[in-house]
Amino acid sequence: MKKIISMMLLAVLFATTSPLKAQWVVTDPTNLAQSIVNSAQEIVQTSSTASNMINNFKEVQKVYNQGKEYYDKLKAVNNLVKDARKVQQTVLMVGDISEIYVTNFGKMLNDKNFSSKELTSIAFGYSKLLNESSNLLKDLKQIINASSMSMNDKERMDIIDQVYKEVSEYHKLVRYYTNKNISVSYLRAKKKGDAQNVLQLYGTSNQKYW
């Protein structure tokens, strides 16, 4: 998928902007977007090959930390044309899914209300959701393949809109998944009279993703 997102963003930009008005930003978001996609795919790959759950997450965290610089830079790009911005937001949501995964699962590893078997299952769930959402980005390559030369603006935007919609659903699902897992811990802790420790670990709903 090398350079697909870069080429696609440029294609959308120049397909919807006149030559006199077309301007690009100093920080090229196309390369940043590709870096986020690569990081997401590497996290998924690491999740499936690590020898055990804790070593697995350490490697996942390392990959995420290496890619976070690109994620933060892309979030700062704010002067894209409308169509390219929707693509940017789609890629950002994939980056955000990996951030939700790393941030919250790192806390779950220190949560005594989950067993090792449960943590392994939770990690698998996060990896599955990240894999599904990052795979959707491949659909955007339809915009620049040979057959897309005959696409009109509506057809092109329909593809962008559909991918954006589906990734948005996965983004919401990851938040819901996180919420439910933390809720299980909270209910178990409450039965033991230890609910306050769970709240301190994860923070309030306004502070965190759940």
Image (tube, rainbow, N blue to C red):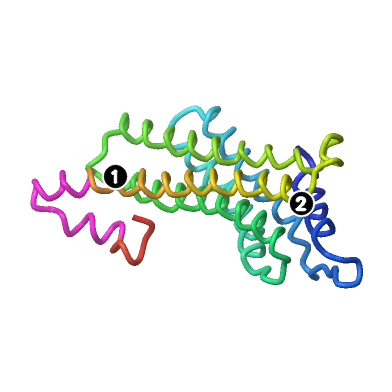
Of the pair 186 and 131, the residue shown nearer to us: 131
Horizontal side of residue 187 vs 60, given as left or right: left
Q: What's the residue type where badge 1 is placed?
A: Lys
Residue at 45% over, 29% down = 52
Q: Is residue 181 above or below residue 32?
A: above
Horizontal side of residue 56 vs 147, given as left or right: left
Residue identifier under label 1: 180
Pointer 1 local density, CA inside 10 Å: few below 14, some 14–19, many at least 20:
few
Horizontal side of residue 192 vs 207, given as left or right: left
Where does the image place residue 55, in percent across and percent down from the top left?
48, 36
Assign a secondary structure to mark 2: helix
Assign a secondary structure to mark 1: helix
Stretch of the chain drawn in magenta? 185-202
- The quarter of the image holding the C terminus is bottom left
Where does the image place residue 175, in percent across and percent down from the top left?
39, 50
Mark toward the start of the polypeptide (1 vs 2): 2
Where does the image place residue 123, in percent across and percent down from the top left?
42, 36
Which label number is shown at residue 73?
Answer: none
Residue identifier under label 2: 153
Name which quarter of the figure residue 120 lies in: top left
Of the pair 198 and 7, the residue shown nearer to us: 7
Residue at 82% over, 39% down = 148
Q: Is residue 44 above or below residue 92?
A: above
